[in-house]
Image: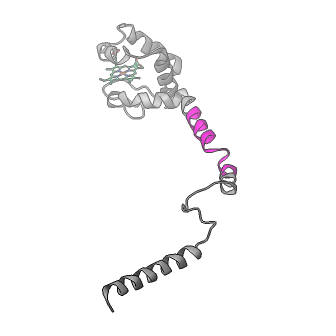
Amino acid sequence: MNTNAIAALFLLVVSGIIYAGTSSNDPSWTGNRNVCVGECYEAWKETHGGSIASVEQAKQEALAAASPEALGEGYYGQCVACHGANGEGGIGPTLAGQAASDITAKLTAYRAGEQRGAQSAMMWPVAKPMTDADINNLAAYISSL
Ligand code: HEC
């Protein structure tokens, strides 16, 4: 056999394999096994309570409407070193058990630079950047401790 004959035979065998392969493919296979369209997507919406976009939107709205308490809990991270993780006090006085209205009044006073106790100077820089919303959120969280 010369090389041309070998090459011809090789081509014949390869095209035979390709033909057999393509003609036995499942035409319903889209090429991506993870695709979820049509009925599959309808079922997904059923179990997740809406389309992908609406589920995502609901998540964002829930985040935006987070309770003052939850937002205050985030801010309280800055207070832990002096007032304790549970408001039990330390360098600063005990905050746990105080009413939200008391916390609001005290933080508002510190923000205004007012002297309350002997160590108010420690609270002035802490309270200075607080917005009214920050103070309300902190009061909501601290009064829950
Ligand atoms: C560097 C330490 C320090 C940090 C941080 C700190 N505090 Fe204070 N805090 C104090 C000290 C000290 C006092 C007492 C001040 C005084 O003598 O008036 C105080 C007082 C207070 C009071 C008044 C308590 C009372 O019953 O009289 C409140 C309310 C308060 N802090 C809230 C906070 C909050 C909320 C944060 C976090 C955003 C915070 N503090 C962060 C040290 C700190």
Residue occupying image coordinates x 63% and y 39%: 54
Choose between 84 and 62: the one closer to the eye.
62
Specify how the rendered protein is coloured.
one colour
Residue occupying image coordinates x 49% and y 29%: 71
| Residue 115 at least partly seen | yes
Query: Which secondary structure class fits the magenta region best?
Result: helix
Residue 81, image x and y in percent?
32, 31
Residue occupying image coordinates x 32% and y 15%: 125
> On the image, which quarter does residue 5 sit in?
bottom left
Q: Does the magenta stretch include residue 57?
A: yes
Q: Locate residue 143 relative to residue 120 in the image: left or right.
A: right
Q: Does the magenta stretch include residue 116?
A: no
| Residue 144 at least partly seen | no
The quarter in which the N terminus is drawn is bottom left
Choose between 132 and 141: the one closer to the eye.
132
**In the depicted structure, whether residue 37 falls above or below residue 132:** below
Residue 89, image x and y in percent?
37, 29
Q: Locate residue 43 relative to residue 108 in the image: left or right.
A: right
Magenta range: 45-62
